């Protein structure tokens, strides 16, 4: 109804005002608010009926920027300042997951974070068009990017998220590379077998290496986690990022793939992949794909070909 759309617009503005003043104390006590915001941030891209309703009933667009601003404030506080509010990192990440993992619509399997990534791509394209026409840009791209990064750190990662990122390879390549580093290499001493296998299957890893090669030739640096692919072992809970040369990131990703190449899921998917390559890393690629023909004994951790593995007594 018309009153619903009008009241919803005022509600978003109210939530924004409350968050600016009371921050986390108002969030943790309302467990339905965060999933609602996760859905609301995707309205513009995933709920055309709502977009039409706002235009016809309230004569306004979806309050997208206000929603993004609210979620950005919440996600930054949860990911970077949770200790200041007496909240554990585990609890903070659990709350973040309620934003990113909720379905964008009833009976939808598309998680909100995938909808946000899709929205980011559309906004990037729109911003490029506005720049070509010398028009001012109003989209809060940086805020939405920060929200997505926080949700990835909290564990909102699946094959759907990886596929959505691959789709943005030509639209916003630096953003794709930044997300890939956070998915695969944010914590260099805790590598995920399932994530590397998923990145190989979805084409995300290959797309990111291609991006790094292209941007590297242009001398472009990419924002990446402070404890990321270069193997900084310092214990630091801050969500710091620094700029790294694109080729440095590519080498770091390949190094991590080399470390995890014999783990179950990754080891299983590598033989089915087209041989990847990257200038200056030919030897490492040879070992990665060469070792894919070998199998690891679960008892002795020795490597064998398929036939010899049958006779290993561990």
Image (tube, rainbow, N blue to C red):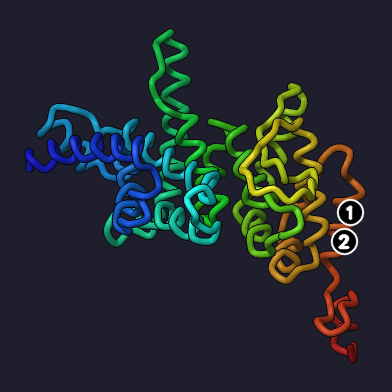
Q: Is residue 140 visible?
A: yes
| Residue at left offset 53%, top offset 31% | 171
Residue 198 coordinates in the image, percent (x, y): 62, 59
Q: Residues within 10 Å of mark 2 (few under 14, many from 20)?
A: few
Disc 1 on helix, strand or loop?
Answer: helix
Spatial distance from mark 2 to mark 1, Cα to Cα?
Answer: 6 Å
Location of residue 139 (image quadrant): top left
Q: Is residue 157 visible?
A: no
Query: Position of 284 compared to 68: left or right?
Result: right
| Nearest to the observer: residue 243 or residue 310 | 243
Vertical side of 48 occupied by 185: above or below? below
Location of residue 154 (image quadrant): bottom right
Which quadrant: the N terminus? Answer: top left
Residue 75 coordinates in the image, percent (x, y): 46, 44
Residue 35: numbered disc = none
| Residue at left offset 35%, top offset 35% | 20
Which quadrant: the C terminus? Answer: bottom right
Total count of labels? 2
| Nearest to the observer: residue 102 or residue 250 | 102
Q: Residues within 10 Å of mark 1 (few under 14, many from 20)?
A: some
Residue 208 coordinates in the image, percent (x, y): 67, 41
Residue 113 coordinates in the image, percent (x, y): 45, 49
Q: Do labels 2 and 1 touch, CB within 8 Å?
A: yes
Vertical side of 37 occupied by 89: above or below? below
| Residue assigned mark 1 | 286
| Residue at left offset 66%, top offset 37% | 241
Disc 2 on helix, strand or loop?
Answer: helix
Location of residue 35 (image quadrant): bottom left
| Residue assigned mark 2 | 290
């Amino acid at each position: 109804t018309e009153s619903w759309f009008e009241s919803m617009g005022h509600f978003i503005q109210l939530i924004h005002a409350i968050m600016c003043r009371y921050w986390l104390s108002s969030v943790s006590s309302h467990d339905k608010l965060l999933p609602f915001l996760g859905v609301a941030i995707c309205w513009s891209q995933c709920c055309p009926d709502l977009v039409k309703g706002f235009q016809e009933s309230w004569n306004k667009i979806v309050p997208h920027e206000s929603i993004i601003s609210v979620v950005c404030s919440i996600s930054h506080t949860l990911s970077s300042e949770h200790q200041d509010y007496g909240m554990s990192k585990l609890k903070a990440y659990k709350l973040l997951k309620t934003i990113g993992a909720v379905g964008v619509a009833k009976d939808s399997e598309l998680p909100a974070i995938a909808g946000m990534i899709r929205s980011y791509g559309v906004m990037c394209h729109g911003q490029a068009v506005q720049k070509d026409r010398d028009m001012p840009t109003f989209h809060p791209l940086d805020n939405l990017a920060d929200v997505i990064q926080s949700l990835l750190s909290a564990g909102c990662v699946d094959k759907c998220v990886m596929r959505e990122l691959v789709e943005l390879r030509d639209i916003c390549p630096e953003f794709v590379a930044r997300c890939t580093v956070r998915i695969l290499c944010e914590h260099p001493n805790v590598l995920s077998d399932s994530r590397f296998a998923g990145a190989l299957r979805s084409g995300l890893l290959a797309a990111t290496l291609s991006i790094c090669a292209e941007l590297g030739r242009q001398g472009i640096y990419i924002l990446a986690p402070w404890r990321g692919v270069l193997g900084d072992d310092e214990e630091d809970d801050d969500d710091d990022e620094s700029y790294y040369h694109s080729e440095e990131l590519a080498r770091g990703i390949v190094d991590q793939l080399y470390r995890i190449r014999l783990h179950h899921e990754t080891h299983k998917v590598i033989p089915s992949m087209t041989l990847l390559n990257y200038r200056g890393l030919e030897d490492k690629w040879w070992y990665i794909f060469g070792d894919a023909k070998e199998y690891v004994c679960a008892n002795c951790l020795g490597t064998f070909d398929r036939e010899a593995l049958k006779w290993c007594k561990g």
